[in-house]
Image (spheres, coloured by chain):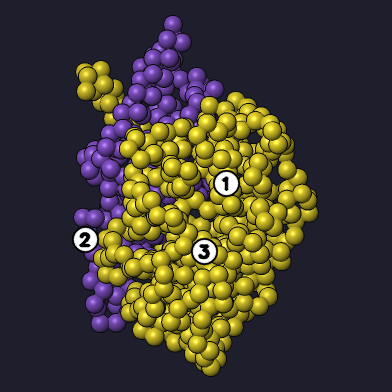
Chain colours: A yellow, B purple
Amino acid sequence: MTGNERDLEQEVARELHRRAEAATSVSGLAGAAKQRAHTIRRRRYLAAGALTAVALAVAVPTALSIGGTPRTAPLPATTPTTSPTAPTPDATTPAAPTTPPATVPAPPPSSDPSVPPPTSDEPPPPSGVGGTTSLSLDGLSTGPLPSIAYVDGTRFRPPGGNETDLPQGYANPVAYGSAVYAMSWIDDAVAILRPGDDPVTIPGMGPIVSSDGGSIGWYEAAGTLTVFTSPGEGTVPLESDVPAGQRLEPIGFLGPRDVISNVSTDEELWAGARRDTFADGEVQGTSTTPPWDLISMVAVSQSAQLVAGFSSITDSGSCSAVYPADGDTPLWETCDYSFDRFSPDGRYLIGGPAYRDGIGNAFTVVVDAQTGDLVHRFDAELGWITGAAFEDNDHLLINFNVPGGTEIHSALIRCGVDGSCELATEVATTTDEAETSYAFGAQP
Amino acid sequence: MDASAATPAAVRVDRDIEFETYVVDRQNSLLRTAYLLTGSQQSAEDLVQTALAKLYLAWHRVHDTASLDAYVRRIMVNEHTSWWRRAWRRNETSVDVLPEHRSQLRDATHDIGERDAMWTLVQTLPPRQRAAVVLRFYEDLSEQQTADTLQCSVGTVKSQTSRAIATLRTRLQDERGADR
């Protein structure tokens, strides 16, 4: 370090210490924090009595057939959906029912005098039929490893083999041709890893991949949306210009040469959506503004030609809607959930709470993509969910985490849309709440 | 923080007393760090409140008093730098270009103006670089402690910090050159 660098660091330190004095103390912070904790807890442990769903009685299966009907043993309706050995309840949080009957019970009343009574700030219960499964790592049988790309620690495991160790801070990896593409959040760049070479980073955001895996795309901060429709050597990239002052967050492919992105500017975090299409034989794309009244896109379905996104976002929640790709009237809208991705055939949507706190979700839902009706809900109970992805049209993988003393136990759980579940990975253990033992690769 | 007390009610009372004692002891320090991360009193209070709320919920898991600060600090940084959290804050000001009206912050005194410029430029750093700068130069954490908080390697802390310093140096030089 040079003397000048040291001087500047000292200057920065002095200024930070001086500026920090501008922060003024506040009173009542402990009480306000406990109030907020109560709200967070309510969102995480959404009152069972608010649900109109009837718990489906599904046995812990001995195996699930991927792509087919789950092979579950039929059970009488009173069989619980939780594992036979329930986790030890936390003495400092309300006890969750360990053997629920077929109808979902009302929540136990709070007897904690320091916690104010629940407010009516929770969204109304969803209508429509659906079931609920309480997730647990105990008592589940073990099925095959995931058949979609996932990350185990720092090891990227794509379905075709060719595992790769990922550098720190890389997310959403996808194997494309002989390389692995990923988002490096540390470098704010798309990273390309080729065997034997140092990673190449391109400032920007991505990657996204088409449903057949044939096309890959990303935004380059230099001012282009770039798409490759073939991983072959010498393939000419398709490019669409992005004006100065705009930044794109590519969301997905509506077709092999049809990309949907979120737009942001220096003035506006959510500046709408953008659709880039590349005519056959053309390498220069054309951008248009889609007709959907959404402030931020979250998912597209190439097979069903649907798009999902936020219609509104507030400090306390959000509303989401699904549109047909070429229509300006939503199929439906909800403020009960927010969403992540469509199933491969576009029939279902995976989602979670309408307010996400950045640590994990208290539940995952599967809804009908055409109607918004709840298909099934998976509750984290005493744990939390850090992601979910469809493995095929009828099964999803849920990244589930449970605290155990000073440790956190995590696994990918494979569940059918009917609620039957099994382990898809080993249960990994970490002592760092912020670490994620497992993660998903980029999904179309 | 021993959760093996006789009754759940007694456990809750113990937890509340311990939690409130911690908040009274540490709230000013946490608010100052949050202020440096966010740049505004209101956002700082919101950030600290959320972090303390999550600490309260996880109280039974945090067994070591010495690690409470580290735990809260990590929650604050995560909350501040996560894309989701940033989505709730429509007044996000951390961009990779200089704000247009920074001259409004300047005092007539050259030194004070220079300090204003420094603070303004710190606020334009990307969230993770800004967090690295605050943790290293205000909290005075070691590179390893900073890496633990940011959940990255020591090497990444070094590169994030050096990139932030380089950016600040370049922009300060531009500022000072523009003043002449």
Q: Position of residue A273 (x, y in %)?
A: 66, 42
Are the numbered discs 1 and 2 placed on the same chain, yes or no? Answer: no
Nearer mark to the viewer, of 1 and 3: 1
Task: Mark 1 and mark 3 in contact? Answer it, CB < 8 Å.
Answer: no
The numbered mark at residue A214 is 1
- Observer-nearest of A4 and B102: A4
Q: Name the residue that disc number 3 marks.
A: A391
The three-letter amino acid code for the residue at tag 2 is Asp
- Observer-nearest of A79 and A96: A79
Q: In what element is the residue under mark 2?
A: loop
The three-letter amino acid code for the residue at tag 3 is Glu
Are the numbered discs 2 and 3 placed on the same chain, yes or no? Answer: no
Q: Give the CA distance from mark 1 to mark 2.
A: 51 Å
Q: How busy is the neighbourhood of tag 2: few (under 14 within 10 Å), some, or many (20 plus)?
A: few
Q: Quadrant of the C terminus of chain B?
A: top left
The residue that appears at 22% across and 59% down in the rendered structure is: B65
Q: Indicate left or right for B42 with A267 as reference.
A: left
Evaluate whether residue B85 shows in this view: no
Q: Give the CA distance from mark 2 to mark 3.
A: 40 Å
The three-letter amino acid code for the residue at tag 1 is Gly
- Observer-nearest of A205 and A226: A226
Q: Indicate left or right for A167 with B95 as reference.
A: left
Q: How busy is the neighbourhood of tag 1: few (under 14 within 10 Å), some, or many (20 plus)?
A: some
The residue that appears at 24% across and 68% down in the rendered structure is: B1
Q: Name the residue that disc number 2 marks.
A: B64
Residue at the far top in the pictured view: B180
